Amino acid sequence: MIPPSVSLTSSTPGATGLLLQPDLPVCQAGFPLDRYDDAFKPYAEEYLALPDHTEASVLPWLDSYVLPATDYFGDALLLLAHFYMGGEIVSLIERYGGSVSDSYVLALQALRQPDKKVIVESAVHFMAETVAILAAEDQAVWITNPRAGCTMEMMAKDWMVDPIATQLVDRYGDDLATVAYMNTSGRLKALAGHTGGAVCTSSNAHLVVDAIRKTSEKVFFVPDTHLGRNTAHRLGIDPARIAELPMPSTLSTDTCLQDLPGGLDRLDQADLILWGGFCGVHTIFTTDQVKWYHAEGWEVHVHPECPLEVVQAADGSGSTNYLWSKVANAMPGAKLAIGTEGHFVQNARRLAETRGVEVRHLADIPDATAAGCGCATMSRNDPPHLAGMLDLLRRGEAPDINRVLPGDQIDDASGTRTRLSSSEQARLVRDATLALHRMIDITEAANT
């Protein structure tokens, strides 16, 4: 339970302000049919057979499945989506009464709305799993496509991190706490709780790390090395006291601490130990891009998963809620270059046009060598999956693979699931909930 003193004042999602446009094409053209599980293939076939994928064609088709489901479940249904969703999913979720926000706010929705018994999320799996960890026993969490994973999370699977974490705990004991970024599985969130640490997001990482450092001499930050470095810079941590682990692909289950760069001396001297993961979407941004836009008179705002030098060169950095608010609150005539996921920037550009504001993707400069890519795995939650998930739930035929329980792991290639035993699941929920509540307490206290 959330302590009575915590009001969750910062956790209420607001309308994005993004309007549907009947003649605007939906970004997703549809995946090959073999990428859909059997239960969803009929919906994909219908979607691909539509005369076009403008809102004028897609909405009536979606309505035929979604509206009966929303009528059937009524106030017990909650639809959720992350800002990074491509195409019209952001708008569609709001159209059907759902909520769109960043990972922190989405994670709290089961807690904040105990009357919602059927929660359907269009996002990546770790986001839905976090909702499931905090959900009550009578709340069921579903994901529209279980194969929607996160490449950063895939660089920090528990079987990759645990051998290093075990050695760190053996060496430093209670002096070390793990801070697990939201972009991790529940299994790593449980590691954070078990070691006296907490979960964090891009919006509160500085608050969480600062608080945990008051009780622990060392912080093991997993998995995003760039967010870790940006957080350290914001807190004034001496770079000489940061130990960055190598690329996860270079490690093995037999890797010993003394074999890491700098050996044990480096780790012993470190206040912050960074796992070597990163987000490929955010590592395409450079200081040259920032300089180009500054020379043209544009403001630059970026996500803190970008490299430190890019964050330092920009006019501001923050979570997707921060970036969206910069666009939503910009004065007419403003020109903003945004360094984050491509679908987000496309949606932000549409919002900006209604306000007389110009928005461009930071990588979109003359002679650019990097494209403004979107999160491809996030976009696996397409209209056929949304329509199929809700229709199958209404009919009582939803595939169990789409049900999300704490500790679930999905193989992205095969679509197979590994599920914990009930006792393992209970331990995970206990420890991960502890880490999540520490984050909530720290964040909400800072916002009061």
Image (tube, helix red, strand yellow):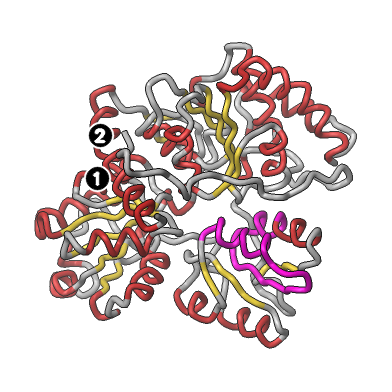
Is 167 magenta? The answer is no
Residue lying at 45% horizontally and 75% vertically, measured from the top left: 308
Of the numbered discs 2 and 1, the one sitting upstream in the chain is: 1
Q: Is residue 261 above or below residue 47?
A: below
Q: Nearer the viewer, residue 436 or 154?
A: 436
In the image, 439: left or right of 256?
right
Given the image, on which type of amino acid does mark 2 rest?
A: Arg
Q: Is residue 138 left or right of residue 395?
A: left
Label 2 sits on residue: 430
For label 1, the residue is 193
Q: Position of residue 56 (x, y in %)?
A: 88, 37
- Front residue of this view, candidates 292 and 163: 292
Secondary structure found at label 2 = helix
Residue 337 among magenta residues? yes
Asked if disc 2 and disc 1 are in contact, CB closer than 8 Å, the reply is: yes
Quadrant of image for the N terminus: top left
Q: Which residues are magenta?
A: 319-347
Residue 100 located left or right of residue 435 = right
